[in-house]
Image (cartoon, rainbow, N blue to C red):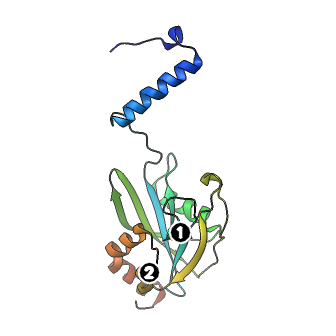
Amino acid sequence: MFRINLNKYLDNKDRYLFLNIIMKILVCENIFRIKKYEYGSGVLVMAKTTGRFLLCKRGPDITEPNTWSNLGGGSEAGENPKVTATREFYEESGVVLPITLIDSFVNEKGDFRFYNFIGLVDSEFVPVVGKVTANTDGEVEVADYKWLKLEDIPKQKNLHWGVKKLYDNALPQLKNIVKKYSGKIS
């Protein structure tokens, strides 16, 4: 391995351009990967009093816009999946309520993992919609919301692919949770 002292040959502007070009080459050649998040986590919230689930319509300017989804997002440094899910619940819903998380389906897409949790709250609540959160660069994360029975989730138009995958892979667990915690039968 050899080393070059860039300070000796390039000024700050040229050094910056040179390093940017090298990084782009390394990323394109898949030698060096830049990942924003280590993993993601989300919460499909269920109200124990009704046995219904919260779906939130994603804002128009974020990834997978205008789809109906659970609350969730990427991990921050040092967080474990449950901490990420809890933080995302509070950030995106805008409410401060006790929530109990139950591990569910882990969705793997390439080298990215998304940990799904079922979040139990005592009763239905009204999330804050149209709120701009600090880490979205001025974008609205939750544009609308609705509480649905379990069997109505797959019927929802513009359902986020991740919620569909969670539903398809965790349906027996979801049915058991509804029955156990709300006494309702789906």
Quadrant assignment, res 25: top left
Task: Between residue 38 and residue 146, name the one nearer to us.
Answer: 146
In the drawing, does residue 69 fall left or right of residue 154?
A: right
Report if residue 131 is visible in the image.
Answer: yes
Q: Locate residue 90, reporting x and y percent.
A: 60, 64
* Residue ranking furthest to the top: 8
For the C terminus, the quadrant is bottom left
Query: Between disc 2 and disc 1, whose residue precedes?
Result: 1
Q: Are marks 2 and 1 in contact (CB under 8 Å)?
A: no
Report if residue 69 is visible in the image.
Answer: no
Residue 77 lies, with reference to residue 120, above or below; the image says above
What SS does tag 1 mark? loop
Tell me the residue at 53%/19% (across/down): 15
Q: What residue is disc 2 on?
A: 153
Tell me the residue at 64%/58% (across/down): 133
Amino acid identity at mark 1: Asn
What SS does tag 2 mark? helix
Quadrant assignment, res 176: bottom left
State how far apart marks 2 and 1 are (Cα): 16 Å
Tell me the residue at 52%/64% (across/down): 65
Label ID, residue 177: none
Q: What residue is disc 1 on?
A: 66
Amino acid identity at mark 2: Ile
Q: Locate residue 79, reporting x and y percent.
A: 49, 51
In the drawing, does residue 141 fall left or right of residue 80?
A: right
In the drawing, does residue 179 fall left or right of residue 131?
A: left
For the N terminus, the quadrant is top left
Tell me the residue at 51%/9% (across/down): 9
Residue 1 lies, with reference to residue 104, above or below; the image says above
Residue 85 lies, with reference to residue 181, above or below; the image says above
Task: Between residue 177 and residue 34, name the one nearer to us.
Answer: 34
Q: Locate residue 185, reporting x and y percent.
A: 41, 91
